[in-house]
Amino acid sequence: MSPASEPCGAAPGGSPLPIAGEEEVSLTRVALDDPRWRRFVSAHPDAQPSHHPEWTALLADCYGFEPFVLVAIGADGELLAGLPVLEVGGRLRRRAWVSLPFTDYCPPLLAPSVSLQSLTAALQECRREGGVESIEVRGELFAPAPAPALALRHVLELSQEPDRLFANFHSSSVRARIRRAEHDRAVELRVATDCDDLARTFYGLHLQTRRRHGTPVQPRRFFRLLWERMIEPGHGYVVLAYAERRPVAAAVFLRSEGVLLYKYSASDPAAWRLRPNHMIIWDAIQRACAETARWFDFGRTELGHESLAAFKRSWGASERELSYARLTEAGVAGAPIERHPRLETALRRSPAILCRVTGELLYRYAA
């Protein structure tokens, strides 16, 4: 854990780095468990589930990265801006700060008095003083030219009347299938009650789903930490779908004050005709409405995956371009999502054990 508070990128006792902006504030590196960061996240209207300190701690503990938060502190001692960070690097990569790896969306949180331009300038100074090659942000930073979109987000604005949302779903691809599934009663949903529901039942379905997509699966310890750090404290939940007492689909949802995020989904293709995923999503939307959440986030969709994007739009979700930023000595540029087509093909054609072993050995190096 980093020291409780020190100037960003400087040794203890060094000079704070000024932010060129509307206020005379300094960018400071504080510990992840600093109570001011938790208060700032809890009160900020744009806070995402990824801003929870527990999410950063989970990633740090699972993959062995150093966590901290870069913050701007006002005259009253409270925060004006914040960005959770993990320091990554090692034998296969130079030191870099990432906010946050294995996270679809984690933009900087700013008070109205702090501009994105001033924060970006301060981060550049931080990068130089900290001696890291780059700072990557799973969101946008200020740049003369906007970064190109590399993916899409689909977000559904919620109301306290789920029936009004239901009426806006596409009739053939969503409403009819939900009604058919409810009529058939072939699928039963259950909210997970213990760690094994996530680390065993969900994991088994998730492993098969990742293999179909040609993507390494996260280490099993990740799911135990996910339960301990996010699900058990109430920052999310897991839903399991059963048909004839057999698990056929499951999903992990993470929540912040105003957002319910559809984080992970897994299913058995043999049961798709029963529409368990439709039942899980509709149940989650109704739960989010009851909890007075403002948004249901369907998560990231890679460019070119039109069928998945169309599925998310069919729920009435609005489509937004998603860009990431990488700050280097040359300035701000878009941070690409790396793809490995040969590995994807190999995993699809191999037994599931290869998908699991590849994740256990190499997953952290994708940060």
Image: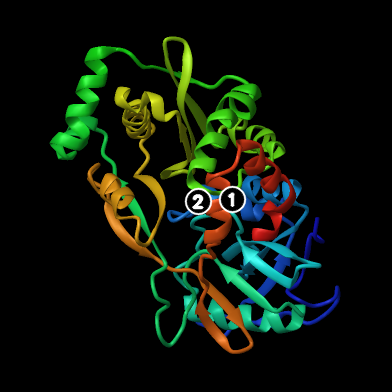
Looking at numbered disc 1 in the image, what kind of residue is underneath it? Answer: Arg
Q: CA distance from mark 2 to mark 1?
A: 6 Å
Circles 2 and 1: CB distance less than 8 Å?
A: yes
Give percent across and percent down for residue 108: 52, 65
Give left or right: position of 345 versus 367.
left
Furthest toward the front, the residue is 349
Name the residue tied to disc 1: 39
Q: Nearer the viewer, residue 302 or 297?
A: 302
Residue 41 seen from this side: no
Looking at numbered disc 2 in the image, what kind of residue is underneath it? Answer: Ala
For the image, the number of numbered tags is: 2
Name the residue tied to disc 2: 43
Of helix, strand and loop, which one carries label 2?
helix
Residue 173 seen from this side: yes
Give left or right: position of 105 versus 9.
left
Q: Nearer the viewer, residue 56 or 40?
A: 56
Give percent across and percent down for residue 40: 56, 55
Q: Quadrant of the C terminus?
A: bottom right
Q: Is residue 258 above or below residue 124?
A: above
Q: Is residue 330 above or below residue 290?
A: below
